[in-house]
Image (cartoon, rainbow, N blue to C red):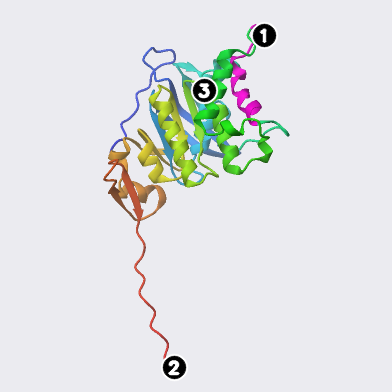
């Protein structure tokens, strides 16, 4: 399919290897392989969005890239080195992950939870610093929760809590940030705020990978789009090049038109509706 060149296969430790990649990655649950042998390069300093139908392996891929899910085969490479060879704190200073759902400790405040994003930067010789305080305040401000800093997390709405978790991931200040459905629970206004934040992080030099369900959000904000189905990548590239009616049909089994946003130039997917004829009125 257009926009899906075959990835090369850099050896471990090669200087020109991508920052984060998977090679023949096989991951599963029980007897079932969700990812049956996937090759995937995360483009550096891009906003990559992964889309696809439910249970196609999007979240599993993100968790494997962050070493939260062990591979049955193949490997994940970070800066050309097998991710299994990194220490926990060393990895957490390089890769941040926001999972779909998280549980905060009882009674913890927003500020204290976001401050936990600085844990990978702490050590016996290095306590809390001005740099840590700056990172936390910037994260609170960027996600729009600075005014909630002294509130308890369990007193917040679902949308507010989601933004607090994103703030913690932002405060971690990793060069690679993985976000699993970060707009869940958010209304349209806050969804757009999070999407813009993702774009700003990428523009500041971070590599961002996000799983999204909303195809039009993905097509508008992604600089690199990855389409999945049944544990495999079926297309990847510039959304303006790969989002076609054929791709939508292959991914979702849906007939749709793809229009062009006259302001942004991004593709806009419009599902087709079957034409319904009026039922004749019954005779009286």
Residue shown at 42% from the left, 87% from the top: 282
Whole-angstrom CA distance, mark 1 to mark 2, is 87 Å
Whole-angstrom CA distance, mark 3 to mark 1, is 22 Å
Sequence-earlier tag: 1 or 2: 1
The residue tagged 3 is 95
The kind of secondary structure element at disc 2 is loop
Q: Is residue 209 above or below residue 13?
A: below
The residue tagged 1 is 124
Residue shown at 60% from the left, 12% from the top: 129
Report the span colored magenta.
Answer: 110-125
Label 2 Cα crowd, 10 Å radius (few <14 / some 14-19 / many 20+): few
Q: Quadrant of the N terminus?
A: top left
Residue 112 part of the magenta segment:
yes
Name the image quarter holding residue 71.
top right
Q: Is residue 235 left or right of residue 231?
A: left
The image shows residue 206 at horizontal and vertical percentages of 43, 23
Residue 1 visible, this angle? no
Question: Quick one: 187 or 14, which is closer to the camera?
Answer: 187
Residue 12 part of the magenta segment:
no
Q: Is residue 200 left or right of residue 127?
A: left
The kind of secondary structure element at disc 3 is strand
Q: Is residue 48 above or below residue 17?
A: below
Question: Quick one: 277 or 58, which is closer to the camera?
Answer: 277
The residue tagged 2 is 284
């Amino acid at each position: 399919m257009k926009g899906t060149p075959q990835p090369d296969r850099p050896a471990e430790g090669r200087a020109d290897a991508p920052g984060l990649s998977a090679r023949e990655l096989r991951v599963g649950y029980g007897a079932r392989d969700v990812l049956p042998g996937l090759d995937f390069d995360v483009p550096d300093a891009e906003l990559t969005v992964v889309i696809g139908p439910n249970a196609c392996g999007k979240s599993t891929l993100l968790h494997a890239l962050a070493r939260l899910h062990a591979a049955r085969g193949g490997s994940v490479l970070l800066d050309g080195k097998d991710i299994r060879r990194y220490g926990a704190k060393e990895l957490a200073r390089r890769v941040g992950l926001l999972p779909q759902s998280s549980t905060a400790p009882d009674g913890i405040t927003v500020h204290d939870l976001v401050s936990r994003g600085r844990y990978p930067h702490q050590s016996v010789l290095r306590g809390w610093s001005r740099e840590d305080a700056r990172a936390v305040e910037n994260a609170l401000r960027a996600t729009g929760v600075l005014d909630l800093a002294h509130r308890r997390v369990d007193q917040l709405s679902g949308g507010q809590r989601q933004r607090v978790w994103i703030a913690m991931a932002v405060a971690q200040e990793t060069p690679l940030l993985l976000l699993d459905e970060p707009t869940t629970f958010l209304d349209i206004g806050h969804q757009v705020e999070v999407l813009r934040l993702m774009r700003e992080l990428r523009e500041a030099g971070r590599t961002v990978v996000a799983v999204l369900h909303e195809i039009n959000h993905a097509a508008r904000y992604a600089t690199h789009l990855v389409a999945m189905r049944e544990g495999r990548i079926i297309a990847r590239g510039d959304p303006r090049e790969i989002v076609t009616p054929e791709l939508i049909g292959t991914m979702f089994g849906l007939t749709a038109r793809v229009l062009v946003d006259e302001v942004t130039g991004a593709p806009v997917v419009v599902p087709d509706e079957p034409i319904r004829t009026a039922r004749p009125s019954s005779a009286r």
